[in-house]
Image (tube, rainbow, N blue to C red):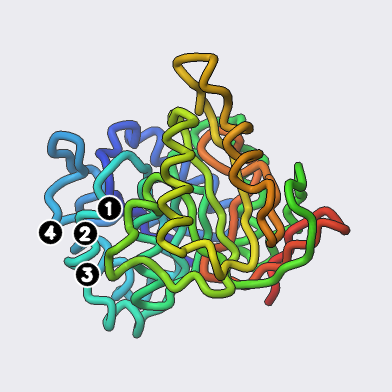
């Protein structure tokens, strides 16, 4: 049986009770995976799941352990950016294995790709399994773990076209926060995927503008927009996040599409550090092996 290491590089996993851990273990056992909880996954200090050094040690142990096949975060919150300069990327590069996360884990996932070539999937963390509404997400995650992620339906085409490239991104707020650091990737030919939650439209505009002004969007092959849940203006006169997208991408020269992926609209995981094909004529995104 293959093994998944669960780590908590961000906020405390207070929901991970003995009963919930057993439930998660059973779900993964059904698809041929055993769960290994790293040493500090249940720690908690303020809004962090333990000290920076302990959380970084868990990351390193998970990658260095030859018995671990997949590394997955328990939950998001905040904290993974604090670990990026505390990891041995050379050692991680020598022990390549998929990394799965969402939300704050975007910082760690991006750094692992940029500095060590680690690929994986965004959109899934262990605690999502506790919500029965996430069954569709678990089914696509299970398929991906078994090597055959189904084609991802395009829900809306904002700019039509066909594009292929290596994927990068995740949570917009966290990803944009890496600009100017050694952990931000070369965007040339990339497929950028973005999602967010609880951000006002003007803040979404500000972050997209920062990506544009830094030239991070100039050379991408395409953009995939996931769910932007509860991204509402306090003042209705400020408009909606859809207005922001209409304004920002109205003259974009590369394919831009929407899919059901993100914090709340959890229907699929999305590959990170892997090649995908966007085809708006066929209406899907396909992972390219």
Front position among marks 1 and 4: 1
Classify residue 216 as left or right of residue 37: right
Q: Which callout, 3 or 4, points at the residue further toward the start of the chain?
A: 4
> In x, y percent, where is residue 63?
33, 71
- Image height of 147 relative to 152, above or below: below
Secondary structure, mark 2, is: helix
Classify residue 79 as left or right of residue 286: left
Q: Which callout, 4 or 2, points at the residue further toward the start of the chain?
A: 4
Classify residue 234 as left or right of residue 279: left
Secondary structure, mark 3, is: loop
- Image height of 189 relative to 58, above or below: below
User: Which labelled disc corresponds to residue 80?
Assistant: 1
Q: Measuring 28% from the left and 46% from the top, which residue is drawn there?
A: 10
Secondary structure, mark 1, is: helix
- Which of the 4 image quadrants contains residue 267? top right
> In x, y percent, where is residue 261?
60, 44
> In x, y percent, where is residue 119?
49, 70
User: Which labelled disc corresponds to residue 87?
Assistant: 3
User: Could you tell me how far apart the alpha carbons at marks 3 and 4 are, in whole angstroms?
Assistant: 9 Å
């Amino acid at each position: 049986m293959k093994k998944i290491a669960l780590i908590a590089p961000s906020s405390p996993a207070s929901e991970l009770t003995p009963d919930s851990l057993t439930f998660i273990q059973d779900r993964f056992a059904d698809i041929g995976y055993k769960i290994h909880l790293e040493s500090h996954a249940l720690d908690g200090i303020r809004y962090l799941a333990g000290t920076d050094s302990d959380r970084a040690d868990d990351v390193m142990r998970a990658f260095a352990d030859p018995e671990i096949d997949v590394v997955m975060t328990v939950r998001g919150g905040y904290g993974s950016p604090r670990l990026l300069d505390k990891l041995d990327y050379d050692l991680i590069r020598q022990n390549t294995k998929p990394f799965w996360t969402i939300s704050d884990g975007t910082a760690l996932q991006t750094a692992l790709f940029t500095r060590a070539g680690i690929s994986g999937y965004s959109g899934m963390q262990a605690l999502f399994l506790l919500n029965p509404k996430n069954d569709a997400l678990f089914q696509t995650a299970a398929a991906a773990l078994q090597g055959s992620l189904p084609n991802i339906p395009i829900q809306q085409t904002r700019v039509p076209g066909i594009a292929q490239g290596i994927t990068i991104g995740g949570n917009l707020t966290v990803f944009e926060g890496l600009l100017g650091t050694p952990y931000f990737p070369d965007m040339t030919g990339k497929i950028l995927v973005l999602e967010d939650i609880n951000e006002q439209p003007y803040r979404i505009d500000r972050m997209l503008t920062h990506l544009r002004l830094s030239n991070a969007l100039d050379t991408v092959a395409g953009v995939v927009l996931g769910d932007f849940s509860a991204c509402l203006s306090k003042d209705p006169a400020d408009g909606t996040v859809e207005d922001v997208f209409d304004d920002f991408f109205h003259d974009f020269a590369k394919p831009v599409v929407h899919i059901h992926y993100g914090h709340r609209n959890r229907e699929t995981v999305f590959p990170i550090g892997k090649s995908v094909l966007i085809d708006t004529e066929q209406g899907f995104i396909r992972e390219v092996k």
